[in-house]
């Protein structure tokens, strides 16, 4: 193709995207959401490849067969990675449960109007007690408005976790087959 034709096609594509910006952004968003596991997989493959090479070249040096070394390295890195993620989960989840339970124990005293459990006695407690019913009404409206947001946040968390797990699987597969991938890319170039 001549240079002028390429330029004309690029300008036409840019104008098409600009004049249909809402559709274009929606399309790019769908493509991005579909490609998210692949991007996560690439990033995890880059990170985990360092550890796999460490185990290949240093820890399992005396094992002669390359495929056996690679398999042992991948299994070891996967066990360490999942162990670390599980350990992190065991650290975070109990703290979340403790925080939710501490907030839950305050609700009965707040509903009865006894603010001494929350604020103690004094001028601040008196001020809050006088304005408590208005605050409760406003808080109920805020909670009612926040429930759909919480549902969306939970949906987003589950979607992100699924993308992460698919990306992790893709990353491990990329590491396991990196020589074949490199050979295929060389043939394409």
Image: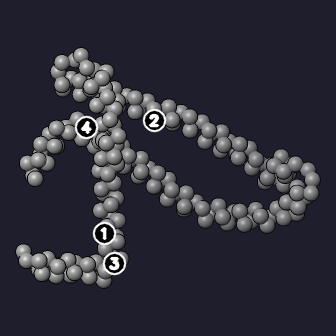
Q: Earlier in the sequence, mark 2 or mark 3?
A: 3
**Identity of the residue drawn at 63% across and 63% down:** 144
Cβ atoms at labels 2 and 3 below 8 Å apart: no
**Identity of the residue drawn at 46% across and 51% down:** 157
Q: Which residue is mark 2?
A: 85
Q: Earlier in the sequence, mark 2 or mark 4?
A: 2
User: Is residue 5 depicted above or below 189 in this figure?
Assistant: below
Q: Is residue 35 left or right of residue 142?
A: left
Q: Is residue 100 visible?
A: yes
Q: CA distance from mark 1 to mark 4?
A: 31 Å
Q: CA distance from mark 2 to mark 4?
A: 20 Å
User: Tag 1's secondary structure?
Assistant: helix
| Number of marks in the rendered image | 4
Q: Residues within 10 Å of mark 4 (few under 14, many from 20)?
A: many
Q: CA distance from mark 1 to mark 3?
A: 10 Å
Q: Earlier in the sequence, mark 1 or mark 3?
A: 3
Residue 175, numbered label: 4
Q: Residues within 10 Å of mark 2 (few under 14, many from 20)?
A: few
* Nearer to us: label 3 or label 4: 4
Q: Is residue 15 left or right of residue 188?
A: right
Q: Which residue is mark 1?
A: 27
Q: Which residue is mark 3?
A: 21
**Identity of the residue drawn at 79% across and 52% down:** 110
Which quadrant of the view contains residue 147?
Answer: bottom right
User: Is residue 127 depicted above or below 14 in this figure?
Assistant: above
Q: Position of residue 154 (x, y in %)?
A: 50, 53
Q: CA distance from mark 1 to mark 2?
A: 34 Å
């Amino acid at each position: 193709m001549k240079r002028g034709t390429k330029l004309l096609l690029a300008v036409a594509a840019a104008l098409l995207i600009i004049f249909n910006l809402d559709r274009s952004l929606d399309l790019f968003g769908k493509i991005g959401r579909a490609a998210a596991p692949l991007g996560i997989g690439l990033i995890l493959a880059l990170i985990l490849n360092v550890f796999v090479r460490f185990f290949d070249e240093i820890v399992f040096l005396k094992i002669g067969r390359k495929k056996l070394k690679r398999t042992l390295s991948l299994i070891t890195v996967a066990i360490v990675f999942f162990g670390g993620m599980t350990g992190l989960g065991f650290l975070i989840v109990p703290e979340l449960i403790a925080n939710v339970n501490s907030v839950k124990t305050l609700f009965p005293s707040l509903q009865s109007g006894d603010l001494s459990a929350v604020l103690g006695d004094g001028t601040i407690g008196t001020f809050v007690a006088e304005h408590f019913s208005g605050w409760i009404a406003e808080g109920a409206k805020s909670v009612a408005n926040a429930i759909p947001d919480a549902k969306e946040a939970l949906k987003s968390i589950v979607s992100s976790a699924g993308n992460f797990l698919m990306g992790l699987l893709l990353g491990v597969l990329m590491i396991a087959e990196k020589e074949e991938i490199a050979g295929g890319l060389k043939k394409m170039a």
